[in-house]
Amino acid sequence: MHAVYTEHGRALLAYATRLTGDRAAAEDIVQETLIRAWRHPDVLTNGKGSARGWLLTVVRNLVTDRYRAKAARPQEVAENPDSPPTVRDHADSVVASVTVMAALDELSEDHRGVLDQIYFKGRSLGEAATALGIPAGTVKSRSYYALRALRQALAGPVSENAAGREVPA
């Protein structure tokens, strides 16, 4: 193989580089060509045609195979630096969403309505009070107690410490 590389290596590399336009890819193709020549030594010594012609044909076929393989795959797209990062695994956000929705279902209708107006619809206290038809002070107290109940539902069981304050169990 050393003699084959010494005699034909430069020509194979030049041809592969011209076909691919990439020196590193051309080196890989020459290496694969020499591996195929090593696996089929009879082709180089059978006296039918030139060894260089066979080697150059192998190079061309390998380049064609690589081109076809790239064309068969979807083209890789570079990430846009302005776009938000891609979330690979969204399981955590799905679990969090399901947990929050279950906790919201445990709230009373009045508390859920206030949270819907303030947090999901983005309304101020006054706007929420107008939309719900209740005083602003009631919206404020309901939102306080609704968030407290939601926090407890999401935190799990709660117990009191020696000072009488609630702490997670």
Image (tube, rainbow, N blue to C red):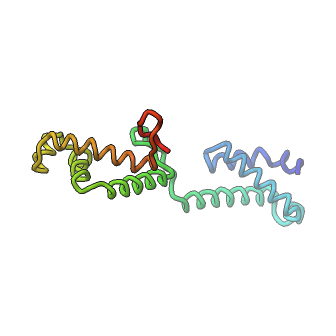
At a point 48% along the width and 45% down the height, the residue shown is 78
The answer to whether 158 appears left or right of 119 in the picture is right
Residue 115 position, x and y percent, is: 25, 48
- Drawn side of residue 23 relative to residue 105, left or right: right
Above-or-below relation of 88 to 126: below
Q: Position of residue 57 (x, y in %)?
A: 72, 60
What is the tally of numbered marks visible in this picture? 0
Q: Residue at x 36, y 56 (%)?
A: 101
Which of the two residues, 136 or 122, is positioned nearer the viewer here?
136
Residue at 88% x, 61% y: name it.
Answer: 41
Does residue 39 lie above or below 166 as drawn?
below
Q: Which one is in front, 69 or 60? A: 69
Q: Position of residue 127 (x, y in %)?
A: 13, 43
Looking at the image, residue 37 sits to the left or right of residue 128; the answer is: right
Is 117 situated left or right of 38 in this image? left
Q: Position of residue 16 (x, y in %)?
A: 68, 49
Taking the spot 55% from the left edge, 62% from the top edge, the residue there is 72
- Please state which of residues 108 and 79 is positioned toward the viewer in this rendering: 108
Is residue 81 depicted above or below 9 in this figure?
A: above
